[in-house]
Amino acid sequence: MEFHKRKLLTIITESIMEDAIEQELKLYKISGYTILDARGSGQSGLRDANHETDKNIRIEAICTEEIAKKLSLHLKQTYYENYAMVLFLTDVEVLRPDKF
Amino acid sequence: MEFHKRKLLTIITESIMEDAIEQELKLYKISGYTILDARGSGQSGLRDANHETDKNIRIEAICTEEIAKKLSLHLKQTYYENYAMVLFLTDVEVLRPDKF
Amino acid sequence: MEFHKRKLLTIITESIMEDAIEQELKLYKISGYTILDARGSGQSGLRDANHETDKNIRIEAICTEEIAKKLSLHLKQTYYENYAMVLFLTDVEVLRPDKF
């Protein structure tokens, strides 16, 4: 069995949240993650990557289902009320389960 | 039950299609979506983000399975013949089902 | 049956690997793929898209499960020891199975 099931946690939020999310990931022992610059539209109105204050980021990290769900609920409770944030979980298969 | 199943619709197409896709999303009542700049290779030949005319975009939106499938078929019928476009659906879990 | 199951292969690696990965995809007859610029953190330490030498890329391609698994194992054997690389597979549904 070469492939192992994990969860991919994807977080889309305001770019000013980058440091805060990185700190949260570290608190949950997630050392590997990827950040992409994004733009888009959400409940808070149109966002445009050309306007510095409206930049979004898309962060993704692979972890166990347990950690993915705990961290998701924590982020919801901590940030959803005051920041534009969307998160979702996806089933993925990885080759090195000890890394995630 | 904190997590709810939805579909993630991902569309990869030419950057000149950005406004058209945004209009389509709005017609299907999808108010939240994320756009990323991309480059790549497809049936239409190599595309390079450094060449303005060859830029691609990657748009993703979360919605119900019904809307995801209806919109996908509409986009296929409307654009596949004349534009470089790839789309795919992924199962995702979200925390606020009323938002999608 | 309009939608067909395929695998999405996502590879996150150092930006200097872009040409090598493109060659690997072509060897496995994968002609369509998308590349995004990224930054992030991994086992090799913090990476920042603002530092040319630390740029990451995120490559994704849709293919059959057979090809996705063969290529994944090949990439692992060829690059994991000497390069920062993470890859994962996701189940996706597409409209034109003959393209993937």
Image (tube, coloured by chain):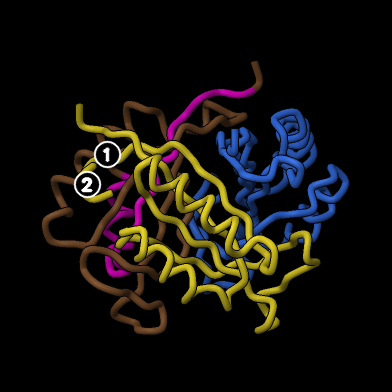
Chain colours: A yellow, B blue, C brown
Task: Tell me if B60 is positioned left or right of C50 in this view.
Answer: right
Q: Disc 2 on helix, strand or loop?
A: helix
> Label 1 lies in what chain?
C
Q: Which residue occupies the extreme right position in the image? A: B27
Neighbour tally class for label 2: few under 14, some 14-19, many 20 plus, Cα within 10 Å: some
Q: Disc 1 on helix, strand or loop?
A: helix
The x, y position of residue C96, in whole percent, is: 59, 29
Task: Tell me if C11 is positioned left or right of A16 in this view.
Answer: left
The x, y position of residue A60, in whole percent, is: 45, 56
Is B36 drawn above or below residue B32 in the view shown?
Answer: below
- How many numbered markers are drawn? 2
Q: Are marks 1 and 2 on the same chain?
A: yes
Magenta-colored span:
C3-26
> Label 2 lies in what chain?
C
Q: Which residue occupies the extreme top position in the image? A: C1
Q: Which residue is mark 2?
A: C75
**In the rendered structure, does residue C2 fall within the stretch colored magenta?**
no
Q: Amino acid at mark 1?
A: Leu
Q: Which residue is mark 1?
A: C71
The x, y position of residue C26, in whole percent, is: 33, 45
Answer whether labels 1 and 2 touch (C-beta < 8 Å). yes
**Residue at position x 73%, y 43% from top?**
B100
Q: Amino acid at mark 2?
A: Leu
